[in-house]
Image: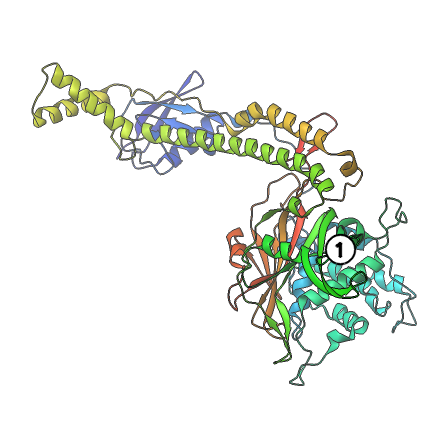
Amino acid sequence: MGEVAIKVKWQGKTYDVEISPESTGEELKMQLYSLTNVEPQNQKLLAKKMIKDDTPLSFLKPGTTITLMGSASADVVMDRPAEKMKFAEDMTEAELAQQAGAMPAGLQNTGNTCYANATLQTLRAIPELQQELLGYKPNIAAPGPSSNLFSAEQLANFGIGGLGGGNDLASALKDLYKQMSETQHGFPPIMFLTTLRQKFPQFAERAKSGHGYAQQDAEEVWSQLIQVLHESLKLQNGGQDGFGSWVAKYMGGKFEVTTKCDETEEEEVQVQEEDFHDLKCNIAGDTNHLSEGMRIALNEKLEKNSPTLGREATYTRTSRISRLPKHLPIHLVRFFWRKDTKKKAKILRKITFQHEIDVTEFCTDELRKKLVPVRDKVREIRKEEEDVERAKKRQRRMKKEWEDSVGTEGKVRGDEPMQKRKEKEKERELKAKGGPATEGELKADKETARKDGEDTPMAGTEEQKFKTDEEIEKERAETILSMKKDLLAAVHPDLKKDPTANQTGLYELRAVVTHQGSSADSGHYTAYVKKTAARKGEAEDGKWWWFNDEKVSEVEGEKIETLAGGGESHSALILLYRAVELPVIDEKGQDGVKA
């Protein structure tokens, strides 16, 4: 079949183009790219219908005029890359591991060490901890075996500081995280485990089979690690801001504890302050949700001697939070000691939890009054931002519907009831005017109208104006910026003095330690860690990394909702939450980070 000559209109110019009737819209776009510099992905072609990449061009007749919409590439200013491009095959293993979005390293199971692997991966999800460890100086005076040839600090420079620190667990953790950051393969945490067992002999317990080490409780190694970091990571400023250690600053909360005797009003109520590094979720026979278990843990009954009554009495111990840390681990207390079996048994009950929690109900009245106004404004901003996203989707949907309607050549589609109603209305008008009365005559009338439409330019082929995402964002930007300024103004002065505390009362889930099995001494531990944005300023994609020892895979956020338990399958044991932070507004008053 010979070439067909058509005309293409673009920005007031007309181009004569010859096409093959056997070609497609994709090939035509490439032809037009050579003439106009409009990249194919930026082109929209309108004839009697929208011409898409897979549209056959056989319907175009000689002399047909089509319209090209789009901007020429010459209008786009291309910046020279700041750095010379480096291809993956030219990168070292460490460089590949540190690329944006790279798969993180797993940890090899050296024999019942999944409890430690899951804990280490979860702790690694705290960026401030990794940053603090980078500047940590090994404890040279720590007892234990060391090299006679090199100091602990010299060994640390080579990433093996644990060798010179004896039982310096913080140094071993620093080395491990550094080594993990330089590979995407499963890494054996042998040096860390050796140091852990030297410092805490309970983790060196041998398996009953006599082969290797015994399985341990992930919560126990978590607690020991946090305590070690609390003692080791002393702040360089000597605690001038009121915090003596990194843990106290970023993971330390405070309770206001009230203890009241239930059996007499004469005894004075005791009020004291206590520190905490995690919250507990106690599980009773009717506990179904995380908040219910937390409520049980914060409102306890205990038996002790009453000096007023001179005997054992029942007391109510009520704990309310007076400081919320930035990073909040919540331990679901699933394991308990059974005297009959002399084992740690597991509570298999299903306990649901959310990706975001509001903990203001567990705070003191004083702290709650400071947090609630900020929390409410965060939610108002989110609602406004959600409205923006809905507006974007609505515009995209309307644009697609218009493009589809242009591409149907006037045919009625099943998803266009409005068009059908218009046709029925037209039919009723014809009947009212004494027009064709029979069904055959009506069909003939429609066919005539259709043919007439093929011989005349199709109405509505002009480009309709739809707002782009950028235009919609610009319209709402001023409102959202004003709301964020109001939010920052609502932050209580006491909260502003403590920027590493939670200032919103809201927490988002960042990592989960799970356990599969019916006993703490058996089964299998894994960790889920939420993926961070590949680059600063980008939005997260909502997916998670699943660390199953050395195996690392990507899973959807819906997978986390299946970890509530209810059987011997994987169930959440430790939930690591991070404070929902305040928005950032730069010096020019521009919006930085979303609330």
As drawn, is 521 to the left or to the right of 563? right
x%, y% of residue 169? Answer: 80, 65
As drawn, the residue found furthest toward the bottom would be 210
For disc 1, the marked residue is 276
* The quarter of the displayed image where residue 585 is located: top right
Whether residue 181 appears in this view of the structure is no
Q: In the rendered view, would you say 572 is above or below 509?
A: below
Image point (87%, 61%), residue name: 138
x%, y% of residue 380? Answer: 59, 32
Whether residue 191 appears in this view of the structure is yes
In this view, the residue in front, 300 or 82, is 300
As drawn, is 13 to the left or to the right of 435? right
Q: Amino acid at mark 1?
A: Phe
In this view, the residue in front, 480 or 47, is 480
Image point (88%, 48%), residue name: 239
* The quarter of the displayed image where residue 176 is located: bottom right
The C terminus, quarter of image: top right
